[in-house]
Image: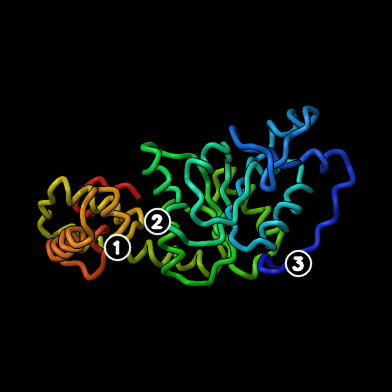
Amino acid sequence: MNPIGALFPVSSPTDSSAAANVLTPARGWPPGQEAEQMAPSNITAAASSIRVFLLIENRLLRESLVRLFRNRPDLLVVGQSGHPGATVRRVLDSQCDVLVIDSLQTSWFPANIALERGDQASLRVVVIAMDSDEAQFLAAVRSGVTGYLLHDASASDVVAAVRAVFRGEAVCPPQLCSTLFRCLAQMNREISLQSAAPRPNLTLRQQQLVALVAKGLTNKEIAFHLNLSEFTVRNHIHRILKQVDAVSRSKAVEAIRAHGYLISP
C-alpha cells in the first residue's frame, strides 16, 4: 500500500459506477479548476454518496485523492482547495459531510467551525499526513476531530477513515489510541483530587474565555472572538491559572470542569 504522502497511481474509471463519481461545484460556485458540473444522470448516485471537501495544501496529494475518490461510487468530492485561508463559509456552503485536511490549523476543527456558525456543526473532520505527536493529537481530539492519520497511512486508510467518521466512528493509529486511554485515566485521577478543592468563582467573561481555551483557540483567536486585546486575554488566563492552581491551560480547563462549570469540549 502506498503512503498518503506519496503520489499513489489511480487508474481512470472504466465502469459506469466509478465514472458516476465526478466533482460537483458547491452551491453558488462557478465551474472552474476546482469543480466540475455534474451530469443529470449522476444526480441519483450523488444523493446517496458521502460528500467530501478536500482542504489539502499539497497539490499532488490533493489531486491524487480526487482521482482516488472518483473511483469510489460512495464518495463524492464536492469541493477542493489548497489555500489554508479558505473561508469556513465556503466549506459549509458545499454541504459536505466530511472535511479532509492536512494541517492542524485550529479554525478547521469542528468545535471552532461550530463557534463561527453559532451552533453545533455536524461536519466530521479527518486530519491526514500528521506526525505522531501526542500533544497535537489530544488537542485535535478535544476540538472534535474524529479521524487522525499519520504520514505512513495508505490511500485505503484515508478512504476507510472517511467512511468511518461519516458513520459516527473515530479513527486513529493504535499508538495514539493508547495515548487517549492514558490521558482519560489521568484526567479521572486529577479530577478526583481537584473536586475536594474550593470551587473557583469565575466571572462570566472568564467562563467565556475558558470555553474558548477548551476549544483549542490561541490567545489571538480568543481576543478576536471576545473583542479584547491579547494583553487582556493573557491577564485573564494568568488569573484563572492562579485561581485553580493549574500549571497549564488544559489543566485549568479540566479543573474548572471538575468544579461543575459547563465547559463544552
Residue of label 3: 1
The answer to the question of whether label 2 and label 1 lie on touching residues, with beta carbons closer than 8 A, is yes
CA neighbours of label 1 inside 10 A, class few (<14), some (14 to 19), many (20+): some
Mark 3: which secondary structure? Answer: loop
What is the C-alpha distance between the residues marked 3 and 1? Answer: 38 Å
Q: Which quadrant of the structure image shows residue 183?
A: bottom left
- Residue placed at 73% from the left, 29% from the top? 43
Three-letter code for the amino acid on which mark 2 is drawn: Arg
Q: Position of residue 150 (x, y in %)?
A: 58, 67
Three-letter code for the amino acid on which mark 3 is drawn: Met
- Closest to the observer: 246 or 117? 117
Residue of label 1: 250
CA neighbours of label 2 inside 10 A, class few (<14), some (14 to 19), many (20+): some
> What coloring was used for the rendering?
rainbow
* Residue 32 as seen in the image, left or right of residue 243: right
Q: How many marks?
A: 3
Q: Position of residue 71 (x, y in %)?
A: 79, 48
- Residue placed at 41% from the left, 69% from the top? 135
Mark 1: which secondary structure? Answer: helix
Q: Is residue 70 above or below residue 63?
A: above
Three-letter code for the amino acid on which mark 1 is drawn: Ser
Q: Is residue 235 above or below residue 24?
A: below
What is the C-alpha distance between the residues marked 2 and 1? Answer: 10 Å
Residue of label 2: 142
What is the C-alpha distance between the residues marked 3 and 2? Answer: 30 Å
